[in-house]
Image: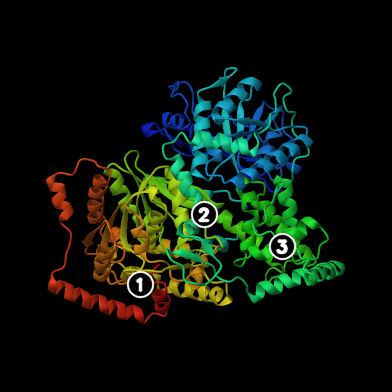
Amino acid sequence: MAAMQETFSTIRPGPGGRFCAEKPRSCCLPGGSFTCVSAAANSCLPLREACRLNGLPTVPLKRRKSIMLTRASRAENEAPANGEYRGEPKRTAVVWFKRDLRIDDHPGLATASSYSHVIPLFVYDPVLLSGMSEELINALQDAILDLQLSLQKLGSNLAIRTGRTADVLLDIANEVGALDVITEAEIEMDLDKLVGVVSASLSVETIAGQDMTVKQWRNSLYNIQNYEELPDCYKKFQASKPPVGCPLEPPTSLPPFPRNLEAGCGPPSKELQITWTSAASKTVNWESFKGAQRISAETALGDQSNSRRSLSNGAVAENPSGGMFKELIAWREKYILASPYEAIEKKRRELTGEAEVNDQEGYVVKGGATGALNILQGYLRFQEPTGRDDWQEVHEHVMSLETRPGASFRALFGNSLALGTLSLRRVYHEAIEYERARGGGWLSPFGFSSFTAAAAINDAKAIEWYQLLAHQSREQGRQKGFQVGTWRWRGYLVQYAVVGEMGPPVVFVHGFGAFWEHFRDNMKGVAEAGNRVWGLTMLGFGRSEKPMITYTDLVWGELVRDFIIEVVKEPVILGGNSIGGYTASVVAGLWPSLVQSLVLFNSAGRVVPDYQSLEYRKPKEKSYVAYIGSRLLLAYLQNLSNGMLTKCYPTNPGRADNWLQNEVMRASYDPNSTAVLEAMFHLRAPLPLNYYLDRYDGNVLVIQGMRDPLHNSSLRASMLQAYCKNVSIQYVNAGHCPHDEVPEEVNSILVSWLKSSFSIPQADAAEEREMNKVWLPDSQEAADLDEELEQQRNQLSADPVTRLKEEMEELV
């Protein structure tokens, strides 16, 4: 088993009271990459701010104490077998479980084997529970119970507590004399901050005159020695052929659990939800926010219907389910893979009307890590007959979850991956071993023989890639003055950035093919005017995950809604460009309590005057035409993306610089990057833009670039003014992305709008005059502009992509 590198970084106070790391030194530790950290090293929070976020007293630091300890455990040069450590017995350690609820492939437990006593610990902390659905909380309870039973079989136990993690860890450390806390390094910003808060609080405490240390481990799919030198292009990363690490086997034993320490047990699910709701409801917006989050986009549009009739008020119309491929697979599963006697019995029951109805609510993996490993084996063997009831139950749901090629794995094991009951290395290893067994000990050079094994392997590699991007982006953003974070939405990793410490909250949503950095100069400019600004990269774009799901305007709307509720935690001024503007309008129209005011930068979406009857129709069924067409379209766009991007910047083409073009190109090579393009073939005409604006009572600012090659800007602006209420329009001499093409001018307009939206005293006369200095064409300029735009549209019409653009004009 290959040894992994342990890196100890000495953290000490840097400029501004923040903590910076010295150059690390290395030694080997079993099974994973380790970093010894403290005092919010990863989140770069000042100690006082870290304590304030967790409700801790802001006690002053003693100068004699170092925030990061250089004392490190000495390890042998080779990784031990079965995760056991063969070094000298050491002091007492706490293994702090968060979302790594397993004993299999757990470097933290492997390292803890070297200590004289080990206290495995899980804390029901409000930060950890934040954003969890009822289904995920139930899965969490299962996982904790399974983990406790597994640890008991190893001669240990799991201490379970409820409260603030920093307080719990300090109490346990004082009770048993623990000096080291071993925990997993986190990707998500909230959990990373939680680790920073714990490190900060423990750094000012001593146990028997000795300082405490927090050690973080990272369990990567690949054996990577230097994360900073990774290429950010997936194509180049795959070309380097990084070696895949082997999973650690579960330990055969663990150091004893202290006898004088009570293990405890977790609260029941209902009580846990009540406790979490009670704690969270102390915030001002809790009730209205949770009410909004409970209402899905389709429910907000109207009652669902299974018919294709015309529905009023923007109600939802279902598409008939079916598909010859799905029916064929279902028939094969029932009558071919099953035993002959079972198949005959099923057929008899169908003919006599005794057939059972499949559970339409989906399948949930239960039983924690033990159950997840078992179901993984059944999932991989989908194409084999089985007499096991639990595996048959899995097989019955696989094809209903295979809405896109490979989508079933994440749909089944999303909760298991989010809670860490399955590791990516274990998933990859089991799938490869299964394929090797099917091939007589060999892997076929022509691909995988089982689509379930292919889905598991590809998803494991994709998830690991986006985790690596998250680590890399965090440091890159810090160098540019942004705090880049990762948020987990429905199990998927979503990237965002934030800048600004005080003031009203502003959230920007990008357009099609872009990312949060498209608002690079707007975020800083607006933040410098006294605002807190977030930039969100929607699912399927940029460095956020690109899962094989059905992308719709409603899915993106729910994503932005949940981001406001779970990350920002208060009503925002919401702005968006192109499809991001349409998505922002969806949020404002369906959940208006979340949006204080709305800003649209050349928004997508039709304006339909005097609409009477509307119908939201769900996307079409999957098809191989879309599967193949999306890949051909992606290859074509990769060759033309730079030229098409420059055309969107007619006034200042230099703003479409090499960095922007390279980042757009980089994202096109990410795993599953065709998923969004494939969705284009399935999407139907969305509801008009003015339908959502009519349902929103707040103020709407439209910043319209008049030289947009994708739309008739004059007509669009006039129709918005005529058919939408509370709309103010500002024209600028720019193309489809005015916020990035002329950022200074747009920022000036936007800052004045923000001041008026939050009832802050109006800007002085000079600022108002500056705001009003917007570009408006005279009659001759307007005629010349119309002629120029017509020429650009004629050029675009020669593109093979134009047909797709015209069909999806409302969104692109």
Circle 3 SS class: loop
First in residue order: circle 2 vs circle 3:
2
Which mark is in front, 1 or 2? 1
The label number, if any, that marks residue 20 in the structure image: none
Residue 215: percent from left, percent from top? 58, 35
Q: Which residue is mark 3?
A: 357
Name the residue located 43 percent from the left edge and 22 percent from the top edge. Answer: 60
Residue 549: percent from left, percent from top? 55, 62
Confirm whether residue 473 shows in the render: no
Q: Taking 419 as reference, is 524 left or right?
A: left
Q: How many marks?
A: 3
Whole-angstrom CA distance, mark 1 to mark 3, is 54 Å
Q: Taking 414 as reference, is 470 left or right?
A: left
Compared with 54, 459 (above or below) is below
Front-most of residues 433 and 804: 804
Name the residue located 60 percent from the left edge and 48 percent from the top edge. Answer: 418
Q: Which residue is mark 1?
A: 643
Which mark is in front, 2 or 3? 3
The residue carrying pointer 2 sits among few (fewer than 14), some (14 to 19) or many (20 or more) residues within 10 Å by Cα, namely some
The residue carrying pointer 3 sits among few (fewer than 14), some (14 to 19) or many (20 or more) residues within 10 Å by Cα, namely few
Question: Quadrant of the rendered structure where residue 719 is?
Answer: bottom left
Name the residue located 62 percent from the left edge and 50 percent from the top edge. Answer: 415
The label number, if any, that marks residue 230 in the structure image: 2
Residue 787: percent from left, percent from top? 22, 78
First in residue order: circle 1 vs circle 3:
3
Circle 3: residue type:
Val
Which mark is in front, 1 or 3? 3
Circle 2 SS class: loop
Circle 2: residue type:
Leu
Residue 723: percent from left, percent from top? 28, 65
Front-most of residues 670 and 611: 611
Circle 1: residue type:
Gly
